């Protein structure tokens, strides 16, 4: 009890965790009945990516290591749909910068922020409370966000709110470059781990990341203090949804609230120090012929009164296929028997762009 009080008071005193210190490190949790060499944080499989992460140069990267990590990732994504990736090599400084910029930007006067409102698409601009909702039948989600797509950050820096938030132009360049590089390594691991035919290599579906024709984007999510937002009973921070791209790299702070659907129930995704939470999106679920699972998730307000007072930050890097990729035609496996679809009877091609347009129409209220 004393320990819990101590932990909570340290979180309260440092509302946003100086060095992204999470509540505790769960790396050594194992689930009963699981093979002992598999590690879990609660229900989330942990994959150690040290041999393939960004600290390993392209030159030193070994196919064998990509294969081994790929097998572990495929095992986790095909059973659970998500993992905690440790030792990714993402520079912790990016997260410290993201924290500073997030605190600065979302505490500016609303009239300033609203000049940068998201207008068309989903990949660039500010979204305030009540503008975006994954489920309009229930109370609105209590969150704000700012999204940066690579095309804006790298090719149209004039679009960024540097005038009201100095530093917001530079930091996403480095962070997104690392996220892209890591994502490409993950794609290579998955292609090898899934034993895809060479022509179906996942990188071929993601050739234009950070350029026109691919909207992969970084999003700063800010869930304001629950007591200041006067939440109504039953109101939550982010409603139940699945992501719709290929996969999402999620960096969450130590406030908690993320929950994952598992066999009809929601289970807490307890924050894990220095790990990236990765979840499969609908497009990769389709492209893999259903092998990699795309799971529902949501963000709740913590029940604990101390934590409710904390603003929660998370940073999501959505890895999306190129807009013209047909997502409802399965990629080809080396093992012909896994290529289940009868290619003569395939449904009409449905591109990622079509999926995005449909989702945008559903989740955004008109300005
Ligand atoms: O903030 C979080 O932890 C989850 C965010 C999320 O699921 C999303 O933006 O799609
Ligand atoms: Fe999500």
Image (cartoon, rainbow, N blue to C red):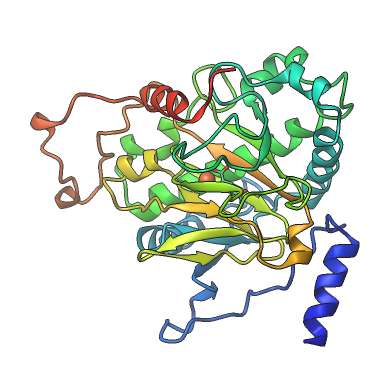
Q: Nearer the viewer, residue 67 or 154?
A: 154
Question: At 41% from the left edge and 39% from the top edge, which residue is drawn?
Answer: 202
> Does 146 sit above or below residue 7?
above
Question: At 86% from the left edge and 42% from the top edge, which residue is drawn?
Answer: 100
Question: At 27% from the left edge and 34% from the top edge, which residue is drawn?
Answer: 328
Give the image location of residue 37, x and y in percent: 49, 80
Q: Quadrant of residue 288?
A: top left
Q: Is residue 49 visible?
A: no
Give the image location of residue 186, x and y in percent: 51, 48
> Does 197 sit above or below residue 227?
above
Q: Is residue 309 left or right of residue 33?
A: right
* Quarter occupied by the N terminus: bottom right
* Quarter occupied by the C terminus: top right
Give the image location of residue 219, x and y in percent: 65, 36
Q: Nearer the viewer, residue 349 or 161?
A: 161
> Does 333 sit above or below residue 146?
below
Q: Is residue 99 visible?
A: yes
Question: At 67% from the left edge and 35% from the top edge, which residue is drawn?
Answer: 145
Q: Is residue 79 left or right of residue 70?
A: left
Give the image location of residue 137, x and y in percent: 44, 39
**Count of labels shown?**
0
> Does 356 sit above or below residue 106?
above
């Amino acid at each position: 009890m004393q320990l819990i009080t101590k932990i909570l008071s340290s979180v309260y005193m440092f509302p946003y965790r100086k060095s992204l210190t999470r509540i505790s490190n769960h790396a050594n949790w194992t689930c009963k009945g699981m093979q002992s060499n598999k590690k879990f944080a609660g229900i989330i499989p942990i994959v150690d990516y040290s041999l393939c992460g960004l600290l390993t140069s392209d030159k030193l990267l070994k196919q064998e290591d990509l294969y081994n990590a790929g097998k572990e990732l495929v095992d986790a994504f095909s059973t659970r749909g998500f993992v905690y990736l440790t030792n990714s090599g993402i520079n912790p400084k990016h997260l410290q910068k993201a924290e500073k910029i997030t605190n600065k930007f979302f505490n500016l006067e609303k009239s300033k922020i609203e000049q940068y409102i998201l207008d068309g698409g989903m990949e660039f601009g500010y979204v305030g409370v009540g503008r975006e909702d994954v489920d309009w039948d229930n109370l609105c989600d209590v969150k704000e966000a700012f999204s940066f797509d690579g095309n804006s950050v790298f090719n149209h820096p004039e679009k960024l709110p540097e005038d009201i938030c100095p530093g917001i132009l530079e930091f996403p360049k480095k962070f997104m470059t690392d996220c892209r590089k890591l994502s490409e390594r993950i794609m290579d691991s998955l292609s090898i781990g899934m034993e895809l035919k060479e022509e179906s290599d996942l990188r071929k579906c993601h050739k234009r990341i950070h350029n026109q024709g691919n909207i992969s984007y970084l999003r700063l999510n800010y869930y304001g203090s629950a007591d200041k937002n006067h939440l109504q009973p039953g109101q939550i921070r982010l409603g139940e949804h699945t992501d719709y791209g290929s996969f999402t790299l999620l960096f969450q702070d130590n406030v908690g609230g993320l929950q994952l659907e598992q066999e009809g129930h929601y289970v807490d995704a307890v924050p894990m120090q220095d790990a990236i939470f990765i979840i499969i999106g609908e497009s990769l679920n389709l492209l893999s012929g259903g092998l990699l699972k795309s799971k529902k998730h949501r963000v709740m307000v913590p029940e604990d009164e101390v934590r409710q007072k904390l603003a929660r930050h998370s940073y999501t890097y959505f890895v999306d296929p190129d807009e013209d990729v047909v997502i409802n035609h399965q990629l080809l496996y080396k093992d012909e028997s896994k290529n289940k679809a009868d290619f003569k009877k395939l449904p009409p091609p449905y591109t990622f762009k079509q999926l995005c347009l449909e989702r945008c129409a559903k989740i955004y209220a008109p300005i």
